[in-house]
Amino acid sequence: MKIVVTGGAGYIGSHTCVELLENGWEVVVVDNLANSSFEALKRVEEITGKKIEFYQTDIRDKSKLSEIFSAYTSNSETSENHQKCSIDAVIHFAGLKAVGESVALPLEYYSNNITGTLTLLEVMKQYGVKNLVFSSSATVYGDPHTLPIKENFPLSVTNPYGRTKLMIEEILKDLHVSDPSWNIALLRYFNPVGADSSGRIGEDPFGIPNNLIPYIAQVAVGRLSFLNIFGDDYNTPDGTGVRDFIHVSDLAAGHIKALPKLFTNPGVVVYNLGTGKGHSVMELVRSFEKASDRKIPFKIAQRRAGDIAACYADPSKAERELDWKAVRTIDDMCRDTWNWQKNNPNGFRKD
Ligand code: NAD
Ligand code: WQD
């Protein structure tokens, strides 16, 4: 059973590769390494003791993508067109993901995320591979009127990154209408954090991190001097923002549970992948201090433009239909992030 993982060298992709390999899947990674390192895949092999087939390719390069799919396709007497591709499904992580950057570089985001996805879908169609798991985001819910967020809540987006996610969801729904033999899981992630418990792989952002936990981790390890907390006057229990932080290994496990669902021919299915619990920025700071046994110096700064006060999932649909539930706590998330960060102060780059 073979899975193509686009963006498999990235943060969520590499953790999902660990889960796939540990659950007996063969893994083919397609990644241009625009935001990741080959070292991550070497470490996935080391953690699991299994091999990954890797192609350093941009998913917008249709001829290279076709070559990859063609390498797994053989002539068959049983199939209608006498061709059989041995790829069972694609998990599609490849994309650019920084909200602020997407406002400055909309064309890059539309090209990479939308054109990349269209090219991937064309090649999948050509080779008769019609099972897809897509990395969507809680960002498609905008600023929700009530909490927790259910999958049927209204959708709205406020920046180019979010628009690419929503547009791709719509494109995938249109594709299924045109050809119901496609099976597509739209997984809406909340706030993925943490690292593999081995401490060998983790989040390794290039430059100064945009997201909370990698920023805190770099303060703890001494790469940054203090954290700016963006606002302490929100309508939340302690005034700081509240999010549904989910351990990346729980998130990865959700993808493994989505695969058998696809093979039951469900059409397009949508799931929130979150814990269902909201935790504040301040709670995360305190939990990280406990995990690292270090003080995290912080300053209260202005609210960050575009931020909402609170956001957390109702994950009960995934629990009911996929038999999946996030089990790790914020203390687990901070412990594993710290274990990764302290053992790899410069991420995957050599010191
Ligand atoms: P990441 O940047 O670590 O991983 C993305 C990977 O895709 C990288 O390895 C990058 O090199 C690769 N890539 C990008 N464009 C490519 C292209 N054109 N061709 C081939 N490879 C390409 O990001 P991540 O945090 O692992 O996120 C994975 C997916 O999940 C993304 O689609 C992201 O939008 C989505 N997502 C992430 C979060 C989050 O907070 N991390 C939340 C919700 C959704
Ligand atoms: C979390 C909280 C900040 C940094 C983003 C994307 C979203 C999704 C997940 C992809 C907020 C506060 C942060 C800092 C802070 N990604 N914060 N100081 O904004 O919830 O979600 O990542 O799909 O689309 O928008 O995550 O980690 O940036 O922020 O105080 O230096 O931490 O204000 O309340 P966010 P985040």
Image: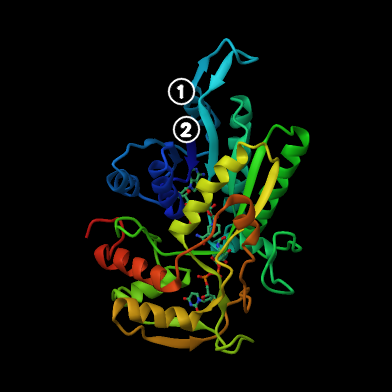
Residue under label 1: 71
Q: Secondary structure at mark 2?
A: strand
Instruction: Specify which label sits upstream in the sequence, 2 or 1.
Output: 2
Q: Residues within 10 Å of mark 2 (few under 14, many from 20)?
A: some
Q: Position of residue 66 (x, y in %)?
A: 53, 27
Q: Secondary structure at mark 1?
A: helix
The residue at the point 25 percent across, 64 percent down is 343
Distance from disc 2 to disc 1, alpha carbons, whole Å, reads 13 Å
- Please give the count of numbered marks on the rendered protein: 2
Residue under label 2: 2
What residue type is disc 2 on? Lys
Q: Position of residue 4 (x, y in %)?
A: 49, 36
Q: Report the colour scheme.
A: rainbow
What residue type is disc 1 on? Ala
In front of the other: 238 or 307: 238
Residue 325 position by quadrant? bottom right
Residue 294 vertical position relative to residue 114 in the rendered view, above or below: below
Apparent side of residue 153 relative to residue 305 in the rendered image (left or right): right
Tell me whether circle 2 and circle 1 mark residues in contact (CB < 8 Å): no
Residue 207 vertical position relative to residue 80 in the rendered view, above or below: below
Residue 94 in sight: no
Residue 139 vertical position relative to residue 28 in the rendered view, above or below: below
Apparent side of residue 164 relative to residue 350 in the rendered image (left or right): right
In front of the other: 63 or 145: 145
Q: Residues within 10 Å of mark 1 (few under 14, many from 20)?
A: few
